[in-house]
C-alpha cells in the first residue's frame, strides 16, 4: 500500500515545491492562515496539506490548531528553499510539470517501447525550442548533480592530469566544481550552442572565466576537444547502445594514453537487485527518450573494452550515483 499509493505523498511534496511553500518559509515560521494568504490558496485542505508535510518530516510545527506555526526542517531549508545555494527543487519542479503526467503512461511505454512525454522522443530538440523549458531542465540537472560533482572533485585524484573536458557540460557546473578545487587544471565545457550563453554566465558568476573555456558543438557530429580527462554527467544513459558506443569511442580517440573517461550516472549494481533508483531512472529514460537506458558497471566495462580502453572501475559518489571510470 505504501508503494502503490506513494503518488499521494509524491504529489504533496511536488505541489509544495511548485507553490514555493519552502521558500515562503525561508527565514520565518508562519501560521496556517498566513501561509494561505501568501500562497493565494483556499482554507479547505490547508490544514491537511501542511500537517501531511509535517508527518512526512518535511515541515516542523510549533503548537496545534489555528495558532500553530509551521517552519522548514533543516533539510528542506537547505535543499528546497530557492534562496539556498544548495537548492535542488528545480528537479522536483520539472517532475511536477513534466514527468508526473508522463509517468502516468508507463504501461503504454512498456506496450509500445516509445517515449511518452511531449517531446516525442527528441528531448534535446524539445528543450532547445523553448528557453524557459531549457532553463528549467538545466537548473534541474544542476540541482540534482551538484553533490555528485563535488564528490568527484574531492575524491578523484586529478593530480596526474592537466586538462579536462566535460561533454554535454550544460551550465558548466562540473567544470566549476573541479576547477575550484584543482587550480592546476584547465577545463572545457562542451555543449550545444543554445547552452553556451548560460554556461558563460554561470562560469562568470563564479569568477572562473580564465580557467574554464566554453566550446559549442554537437557531440555526435563534432570531434571532442582533446583532454587528459573527459567527463560525461548523465549523458550516456540518454541514448541507445550504438550511440553509447559512438560517444565512448569518440572519448577514447580524444584522450592521450593514460587518459580517463568518467561517466557519472546512477550505475545499476551488477546483480540488478539493489539500486532501485538506477533501475527506475532507466524506466524514466524509456518515458523520456524511448531508447535510452541506464546500465551496470559490468555493462560499462564491456563497452569500454570494446572501444579500446584497457581497464575500468566504479567510484561511488552520493546516494545511488557513481562514477564509472575507463582508463586508456
Image (cartoon, grey):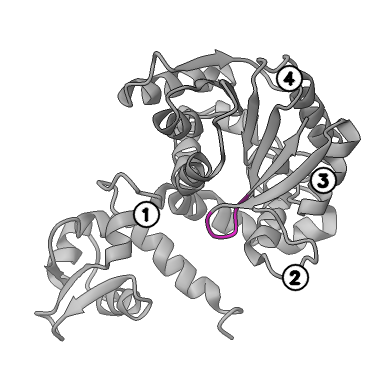
Q: CA distance from mark 2 to mark 3?
A: 19 Å
**Is the residue under label 2 in contact with that under label 4 (CB below 8 Å)?**
no
Element class at badge 2 = loop
Q: Nearer the viewer, residue 92 or 174?
A: 174
Q: Which residue in the structure is indicated by mark 2?
A: 273
Residues at marks 4 and 1 touching, judged by CB atoms closer than 8 Å: no
Q: Quadrant of residue 230?
A: top right
Which one is nearer the viewer's eye here, 24 or 157? Answer: 157
Q: Earlier in the sequence, mark 4 or mark 3?
A: 4
Residue 292 appears in view: no
Tag of residue 256:
4
Q: Disc 4 or 2, which lies upstream in sequence?
A: 4
Between disc 2 and disc 3, whose residue precedes? 2
Q: Where is residue 309 drawn, in percent x and y?
A: 82, 33
The reply, left or right, for residue 217 in relation to residue 196 is right
The earlier-in-sequence mark between 2 and 1 is: 1
Tag 1 or tag 3, which sits nearer the N-term? 1
Q: Nearer the viewer, residue 106 or 300?
A: 300
Q: What residue is at 42 percent from the left and 61 percent from the top?
A: 14
Q: Nearer the viewer, mark 2 or mark 1?
A: 2
Badge 3 crowding class, 10 Å Cα cut-off, few under 14, some 14 to 19, many 20 or more, is some
Magenta range: 318-322
Q: Report the residue marked by disc 3.
A: 301
What's the CA distance linking mark 4 and mark 3? 19 Å
Marks 4 and 3 in Cβ contact (< 8 Å): no
Does 307 sit above or below residue 150? Answer: above
Q: How many marks?
A: 4
Residue 307: % across, % down: 87, 31
Amino acid at each position: 500500500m505504501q508503494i502503490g499509493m506513494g503518488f499521494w505523498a509524491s504529489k504533496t511534496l511536488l505541489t509544495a515545491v511548485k507553490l514555493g511553500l519552502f521558500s515562503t518559509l525561508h527565514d520565518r515560521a508562519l501560521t496556517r492562515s498566513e501561509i494561505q494568504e501568501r500562497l493565494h490558496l483556499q482554507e479547505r485542505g490547508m490544514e491537511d496539506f501542511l500537517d501531511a508535510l509535517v508527518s512526512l518530516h518535511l515541515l516542523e510545527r510549533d503548537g496545534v490548531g489555528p495558532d500553530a506555526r509551521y517552519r522548514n526542517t533543516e533539510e528542506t531549508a537547505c535543499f528546497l528553499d530557492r534562496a539556498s545555494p544548495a537548492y535542488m527543487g528545480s528537479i522536483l519542479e520539472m517532475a511536477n510539470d513534466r514527468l508526473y503526467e508522463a509517468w502516468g503512461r508507463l504501461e503504454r511505454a512498456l506496450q509500445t517501447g516509445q517515449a511518452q512525454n511531449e517531446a516525442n522522443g527528441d528531448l534535446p530538440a524539445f528543450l532547445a525550442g523553448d528557453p524557459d523549458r531549457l532553463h528549467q531542465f538545466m537548473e534541474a540537472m544542476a540541482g540534482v548533480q551538484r553533490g555528485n560533482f563535488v564528490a568527484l572533485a574531492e575524491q578523484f585524484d586529478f593530480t596526474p592530469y592537466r586538462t579536462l573536458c566535460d561533454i554535454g557540460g550544460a551550465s558548466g557546473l562540473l567544470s566549476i566544481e573541479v576547477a575550484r578545487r584543482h587550480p592546476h587544471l584547465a577545463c572545457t565545457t562542451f555543449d550545444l550552442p543554445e547552452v553556451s550563453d548560460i554556461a558563460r554566465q554561470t562560469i562568470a558568476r563564479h569568477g572562473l572565466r580564465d580557467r574554464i573555456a566554453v566550446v559549442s558543438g554537437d557531440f555526435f557530429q563534432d570531434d571532442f576537444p582533446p583532454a587528459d580527462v573527459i567527463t560525461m554527467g548523465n549523458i550516456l544513459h540518454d541514448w541507445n547502445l550504438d550511440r553509447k558506443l559512438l560517444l565512448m569511442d569518440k572519448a577514447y580517440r580524444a584522450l592521450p594514453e593514460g587518459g580517463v573517461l568518467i561517466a557519472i550516472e546512477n550505475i545499476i549494481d551488477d546483480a540488478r537487485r539493489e539500486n532501485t533508483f538506477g533501475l527506475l531512472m532507466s524506466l524514466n529514460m524509456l518515458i523520456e527518450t524511448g531508447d535510452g537506458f541506464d546500465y551496470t558497471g559490468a555493462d560499462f566495462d564491456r563497452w569500454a573494452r570494446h572501444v579500446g580502453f584497457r581497464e575500468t572501475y566504479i567510484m561511488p559518489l552520493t546516494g545511488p550515483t557513481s562514477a564509472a571510470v575507463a582508463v586508456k
